[in-house]
Structure formats: structure tokens, C-alpha cells
Amino acid sequence: MNRAVILDRDGVINEDSGYLYKPEDFTFIEGIFHFCRAARQKGYLIIIVTNQSGIARGYYTEEDFLRLSDWMCNKFEEQGILIGRIYYCPYHPTEGIGRYKRDSYDRKPNPGMILKARDDFDLDLKHSIIIGDRDSDMIAGRKAGVGKLLLLPGKYEYTAADDVKIINSLSDAERFL
């Protein structure tokens, strides 16, 4: 079985500027490349799980999201870091338009994307880590059985929980590897 660091995108990998889909608007969070290199050196796979309600709301297309994801993965590769896969949920239960307006087991706080990653990569979730910036990331990790729940506070309020470790930076997260 494999271990993974499961990362939320907006607020963990990049500054959360809201409904991001253009490379020119993408700013990496300080320390993301260093942290991911350290995780890979310790044998962790890097997996990304991200809600993308901007697709559901019609702000950008799935193709826009996939182009940005390819660009982002290339930036990681330039830094010597392989991203295992990006899982995304383009649906929203109330704000979605057309076929994107629906509830989905993949949308965090549901654990669907994490469980897909578990099955695709034979992950030992008990010995894996999730890093997010919202309660929904922590709840999804908890529901999926992820062993370490790390919250990187950003612009969203969060609820303290005994099983969640608050980190001040991605360099602070390295002690949990």
C-alpha cells in the first residue's frame, strides 16, 4: 500500500483568489514546492482533491480547469515533483447550472474524491495526510479515514477539532511527514 499527501488546491497550493482558471492569475503558496519535494522524498504520493464550483456556476469550463491543471502540473514537474492525479468535483447542489446542478458524493465535505484516489493508487489512508484550508477538507478527510488532518488557515473560518492539527505554513507541515 502507498501513502499520500492529499492537498486541496485553492488556499493550499495557490492563493485563493476565487474562481481561478487562468495561469496569469495563479500564485503558488510559499513553500509548496519545498514541502512536496520533502513529502516525495519520504515516499508520499502527491494527490490533489478540489471542489470546482466555478465550473458549476458557469464562470469557466471544465476545459479551462483542465488547461490550468496541466499548466500547474508542468510547474511542479519543472521543480522535480510528480503529481499523482488531480481529482475535481465540478458540481454544486444549489448554485450549479444545467447538468452541474446536483449533489455529488465527490464534493467535499463528502469523501468521494479521496476514496477514488484510495482505490486508484492503493492508498493506506490511515498513514496518509490531508492538508486543506476549510472545515470541508477536514470533514472529507475524516470521513475517508485519513490519518493526519492538517488545516492551513486562510480566509475561511474553521472549527477547532481534537483530531485536526493547525499549521502556520507548509514548512510547519513537514514535521508531520
Image (spheres, rainbow, N blue to C red):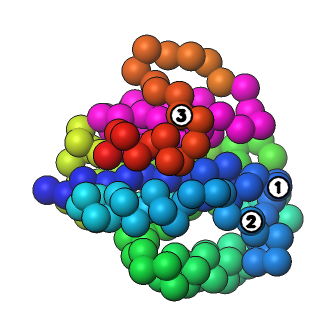
Label 3 and label 2: CA atoms lie apart by: 20 Å
The CA span between labels 2 and 1 is: 9 Å
Whichever of callouts 1 and 3 sits on the residue coming sooner in the sequence is: 1
Which residue is identified by label 1? 17
The residue sitting at 61% across, 76% down in the picture is 72
Whether residue 140 appears in magenta in the rendering, the answer is yes
Q: Is residue 14 left or right of residue 118?
A: right
Query: Quick one: which residue is furthest to the left in this view?
Result: 1
Is 45 a magenta residue?
no
At a point 82% along the width and 54% down the height, the residue shown is 18
Task: Report, in whole angstroms, how far the alpha carbon at label 1 lies from the one at label 3.
Answer: 21 Å
Q: Amino acid at mark 2?
A: Thr
Question: Which residue corresponds to the image point at 49% horizontal and 79% vertical from the top-left?
Answer: 79
Location of residue 159 by image quarter: top right
The answer to whether the residues at label 2 and label 1 have Cβ atoms under 8 Å apart is yes
Instruction: Provide the secondary structure element on which disc 3 rests.
Output: loop
Q: Residue at label 2?
A: 27
Front residue of this view, candidates 152 and 117: 152
